[in-house]
Amino acid sequence: MTLARTHCITLLGVQGHIVEVEVHLGGGDFGVTLVGLPDAALREARDRIRAAVANSGEEWPSGQIVISLSPASLPKAGSLFDLAIAGAVLSASGGVPADRLEGTVLIAELGLDGRARPVLGVLPAVVSAAEQGYRRFVVARGNAAEARLVPDVEVTAVDSLTDLCAWLRGELLPEEPQEYAPRPREPRDQGPDLADVLGQPVARRAVEIAAAGGHNLMMLGPPGTGKSLLAERLPTVLPPLSPAEALEATAIHSVAGILPPGSPLVTVPPFAAPHHTSSRASIIGGGSGCPAPGWVSKAHRGVLFVDEAPQFGRGVLDSLREPLERGEVVLARASSTVTFPARFQLVMAANPCPCAKPGTLCTCPSGERRRYLSRLSGPLLDRIDLKVELQPVSRAELLADRAFAESSEVVAARVGKARARAAERLAHTPWTTNAAVPGARLRREFPVEPAALRVLGRAMDLGQISARGVDRALRVAWTLADLAGRERPGEEDVAYAFALWSGRAW
């Protein structure tokens, strides 16, 4: 036969699009034509695949070869098409049977010696193809565990183009490794412990509230007071990711190429801490060619820690406002629009002044201190639910706090119960945490007693809180009620929530 076809997939963000790979063999002088909007890496596939076929002991067909990637209007990028193109070329020349190629999606890069190399983004690619009705996949062995995370699909792992040809001819391949099963997280795997941070009971309580309600947190204080320690310990008190959340986070990490070896599934909330020199594109996502996920997406379903927040560019910080509201990032390009999920908890930390010296040692004029903190815009701070100030602690305070500091395991148990109460209350809605509920729905469907609103009413009259701030304070109040096991927030809960929102809890 002179015409053969199989399937591969191309990724735009974390959304996959099926690509039909067609190969036509014609007469005349030798030549290979690749059409269908390929990028530079894909155009180079012609020479790479020809060498792989020759070094695998197969025969490369003579004459004109036309390789078409459909739909032709969809941009294609990367080297994940190599295996599909090689299989279609060999099938068109009669070197291998074509029956197994029908309805099969092939994803792998080929080396010049014919080895099948793993590629980025296999999990979202297989998920998207499965949603479009494809159930049979051939991938490089290095991607097999990741691909098998998708239920109800048949995954064949190959080490080389020779293995693919053997599979197409109906021969048996080497024994498959056992499927990956997520290992339960043991206490020693939980990393840092919240009990390590002594002398900051209000800040530890704020971390617990943030975890219970999914709230954003801002910490202000001089160096050495525990801001970074607290941020790093927030994931240890968050609930493990649900199966759906784990697949979402893993898909992003797969596209970004940051999946740890031997652990193809992300089961704990991610923690991302970009440096203060990071650009807007690295935080939000983008780049030349196919846009890549930024730090806000790498922290999806986890925590984004912005340390030394005033040192970031103001435009970089303000670019966080839309992801915080929408839970996603939309990157518009001339040829396509890419959407990355970005539902994360923001934790910011800042020193009170440029010199960062505590108390009477600070030499910064008041005007300089105001200018330093004014780098954090009001609209961004208005989206922070909890604001706490950390003060230096004495040795006596550290020793006294040892008896009251609770471990992450103890706090995580309370957080889990609070989240369960919130999920039960929100069962008829699309949301599972208090922080995610829109203000209008919060006021209409979950009203609090009028007496409990008096604090917020007075604050609005004095211009101390905005309408958005009222909604955020009410969300925190509901979280406080969930932690205390109360049916609805009381006046004390609302007052403390307002103090946390305004930064007056210290």
Image (tube, rainbow, N blue to C red):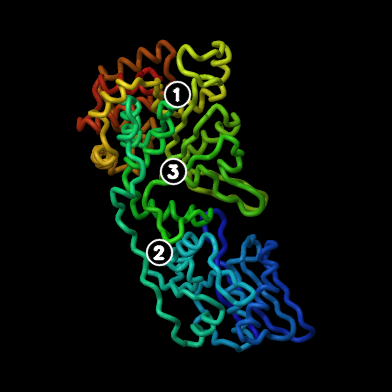
Query: What's the amino acid at mark 3?
Result: Phe
Residue pictured at 31% horizontal, 36% vertical:
212
Q: Position of residue 498 (x, y in %)?
A: 35, 20
Image-quadrant location for residue 488: top left
Between circles 3 and 2, the one closer to the viewer is 3
Residue 150, numbered circle: 2
Q: Which residue is mark 3?
A: 271
Contact, mark 1 vs mark 3 (Cβ under 8 Å): no
Q: Position of residue 163 (x, y in %)?
A: 51, 81
Element class at badge 3: strand
Element class at badge 1: strand
Residue pictured at 35% horizontal, 17% vertical:
456
> In 3D space, how far apart are the residues under numbered discs 3 and 2 (Cα atoms)?
24 Å
Q: Earlier in the sequence, mark 3 or mark 2?
A: 2
Judge from the rendering whether residue 331 lies leftward or rightward of residue 381; answer left or right. Answer: right
Q: Which residue is mark 1?
A: 220
Mark 3 burial class by Cα count in 10 Å: few <14, some 14-19, many 20+: many
Query: What's the amino acid at mark 2?
Result: Val
Task: Using the rendered image of the protein, determine whether residue 475 is visible from the camera's viewpoint.
Answer: no
Between 78 and 408, the residue placed more toward the observer is: 408
Residue pictured at 38% horizontal, 37% vertical:
436
Contact, mark 2 vs mark 1 (Cβ under 8 Å): no
Q: Earlier in the sequence, mark 1 or mark 3?
A: 1
Mark 1 burial class by Cα count in 10 Å: few <14, some 14-19, many 20+: many
Between 385 and 199, the residue placed more toward the observer is: 199
Residue pictured at 28% horizontal, 25% vertical:
399
Q: Position of residue 104 (x, y in %)?
A: 50, 75
Q: Residue furthest right?
A: 29
Q: Is residue 329 above or below residue 494?
A: below
Q: Earlier in the sequence, mark 2 or mark 1?
A: 2
Mark 2 burial class by Cα count in 10 Å: few <14, some 14-19, many 20+: some
